[in-house]
Amino acid sequence: MAKEIGLKETIILQTLKDAIKSNLSCQTLEDGKVYVPGSYAEFRNKYFPYWSEATIRRKLNRLHELGYIESCQPEGFAHRRKYYTVIK
């Protein structure tokens, strides 16, 4: 998979899958899907301390564009926190 989408994207995707599987800090939203909430800073502190927030943002956006993840902001756009779920 790393050859297909990139190493960092694969690491992020697997981390999201593991968090959802273990139900670690996850929330089920109205659509019935389980999401991992977090701002880019929260993701950096919790999962990826070796990457910059800009890198995390770019890689999450790329995974979204490729159709591997879905995101939403149920708390509204005033909050920096987004919710992510794996769809592929």
Image (tube, helix red, strand yellow):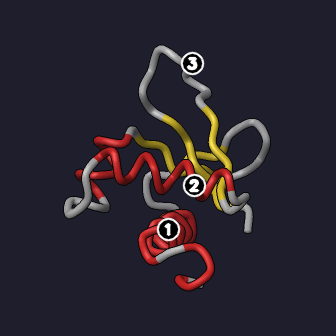
Task: Identify residue for label 3.
Answer: 76
Mark 3 or 1 closer to N-term?
Answer: 1
Single out the mark in the foreground, 2 or 3: 2
- Residue at left offset 46%, top offset 66%: 12
Task: Identify residue for label 2.
Answer: 62
- Residue at left offset 53%, top offset 83%: 2
- How packed is label 2: few (under 14 Cα within 10 Å), some, or many (20 or more)? some
Left or right for 28, reference 83: right
Amino acid at pointer 1: Glu
What secondary structure is marked by label 2? helix
Left or right for 44, reference 12: left
7 w.r.t. 57: above or below: below
Amino acid at pointer 2: Arg
The quadrant of the picture occupied by the C terminus is bottom right
Q: Nearer the viewer, residue 46 or 3?
A: 3
Mark 2 or 3 closer to N-term?
Answer: 2
Any mark on residue 9, and which? 1
Amino acid at pointer 3: Gly
Left or right for 8, reference 75: left
What secondary structure is marked by label 1? helix
Left or right for 40, reference 15: left
- Furthest toward the right, the residue is 31
Separation of marks 3 and 1 at Cα, in angstroms? 26 Å
Circles 2 and 1, Cβ within 8 Å, touching? The answer is: yes
- Residue at left offset 51%, top offset 64%: 16
- How packed is label 1: few (under 14 Cα within 10 Å), some, or many (20 or more)? many
Single out the mark in the foreground, 3 or 1: 1
- Residue at left offset 63%, top offset 35%: 72
**Residue 30's x, y, as percent?**
75, 36
